[in-house]
Image (cartoon, rainbow, N blue to C red):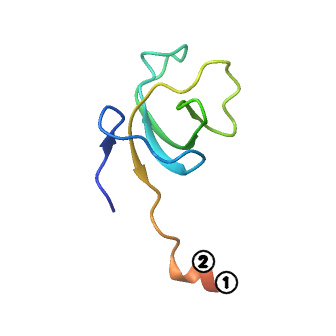
Amino acid sequence: MNSWISIKDQLPKEGEEVLVLVDGHRGPSWCNTYMLVAYMSQTHKFWEERHIADDPLAVTHWMPLPDMPKEALSGRF
């Protein structure tokens, strides 16, 4: 798997789904830092499909998603 990339160094491509590290202490959330899959918007903000708040996610780092397992691609689990 690839290394984490700071958003200060590089942003993912627009619309690309990536694994992100979210700082829960900087946003309206009370929880600690956590990971989830999100995408980069046209305005260079991170969002995730189930994110219902009006504010974008407080992402600090991201990385590309890993490849799917071969079994999943072939339909054999």
Q: Residue at x 56, y 50 (%)?
A: 17
Res 38 quadrant in image = top right
Crowd tier of the residue under label 2, counting other residues whose Cα lies within 10 Å: few below 14, some 14–19, many 20 or above? few
The amino acid type, in three-letter code, at marker 2 is Ala
Q: Secondary structure at mark 1?
A: loop
Tags 1 and 2 touching, CB below 8 Å:
yes
Crowd tier of the residue under label 1, counting other residues whose Cα lies within 10 Å: few below 14, some 14–19, many 20 or above? few
Residue 34 in view (yes/no)? yes
Q: Residue at x 50, y 48 (%)?
A: 13
Quadrant of the image for the N terminus? bottom left
| Residue 50 horizontal/vertical position (percent) | 69, 36
Quadrant of the image for the C terminus? bottom right
Q: Which residue is disc 1 drawn over?
A: 75
The amino acid type, in three-letter code, at marker 1 is Gly
In this rendering, position of residue 34 left or right of residue 57: left
| Residue 71 horizontal/vertical position (percent) | 56, 82
Residue 76 in view (yes/no)? no
Q: Which mark is residue 72?
A: 2
Q: Residue at x 36, y 35 (%)?
A: 7
Res 25 quadrant in image = top left
